[in-house]
Amino acid sequence: EVQLVQSGVEVKKPGESLKISCKGSGYSFNSYWIGWVRQMPGKGLEWMGMIYPGDSDTKYRASFQGRVTISADTSISTAYLQWSSLKASDTAMYYCARHIGAEVGTRLDHWGPGTLVTVSS
Amino acid sequence: SYELTQPPSVSVAPGKTASISCGGNNIETKSVHWYQQKPGQAPVLLIYYDRDRPSGVPERFSGSNSGNTATLTISRVEAGDEADYYCQVWDSGSDHDLVFGGGTKLTVL
């Protein structure tokens, strides 16, 4: 059974750094892109970017480029999303999800439960 | 960048049919996928490649894609179908992004 398990709730102050995680199991972690999706309070879904753990190839949505870093550690089947300096506007639920299908047909077939990040002074 | 337009809300009585649209320029040339998100839960893939259902998704859920509009149709609507629904495509233009529609809140009256 494919599972994505995410790290727990985070409460941070503006300017602090943060790294949240997403551990995959039940499939070949190295062979599927993992994407990150933001959902701000009461809002819709925004795709942030993705990583191919097998070679660490990474793609970012333009609006998130330079604001976050996506990485992966294949030895523990875990993907990460990190910030070097959080802002209050980073307050959101963050989901990791497995991409499946070729690029033009790619969709997210398995999702983690989400990590709630709250940034407040 | 490619944009997908969904109505913010759709209401339907139990047992009736709900249709949720997803508009995009020449969307029929793209593969459209749909997700269901119930309150407090992660999204779930509902329809892929315009009309295919993952294992476990009831046949009451169906999809179509023509011209500038893709449509998710839910037949014999149940109270448990009340959720937010999102369409999604891959934008293979200059940005190479995964794009979601703004989401539609389905209310079962």
Image (spheres, coloured by chain):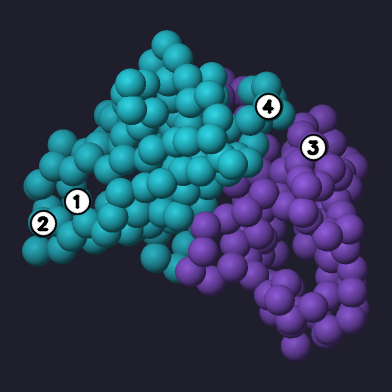
Callout 1 crowding tier (Cα within 10 Å): few <14, some 14–19, many ≥20: some
Q: Name the residue carrying label 4.
A: A101
Residue A63 relative to residue A43: left or right: left
Q: Residue furthest bottom?
A: B109
The residue depicted at 32 percent of the width and 58 percent of the height is: A116
Q: Tell me the SS state at disc 1.
A: loop
Say whether residue A34 is left or right of residue B76.
left
Q: Of label 4 and label 1, which has the lower sequence position?
A: 1
Give the residue pinned by disc 2.
Answer: A13
Q: Position of residue B17 (x, y in %)?
A: 89, 72
Q: Is A51 on the left or on the right of B78, as rendered? A: left
Between the residue at mark 4 and the residue at mark 1, the CA separation in whole angstroms equals 34 Å
For residue B22, which numbered disc appears in the image? none
Q: Nearer the viewer, mark 4 or mark 1?
A: 4
Chain B appears what colour? Answer: purple
* Chain letter of the residue beneath label 1 in the structure image: A
Q: Are marks 3 and 1 in contact (CB under 8 Å)?
A: no
Q: CA distance from mark 2 to mark 4?
A: 38 Å
> Residue B7: x percent and y percent?
70, 64
Label 4 SS = loop
A52 relative to A12, above or below: above
Residue in view at x 52 percent, y 57 percent: B42
The amino acid type, in three-letter code, at marker 1 is Lys
Marks 4/1 in contact by CB < 8 Å: the verdict is no
Disc 2 marks a residue whose amino acid type is Lys
Q: Report the residue marked by disc 1.
A: A87
Q: Chain of mark 2?
A: A
Q: Position of residue A49 (x, y in %)?
A: 44, 32
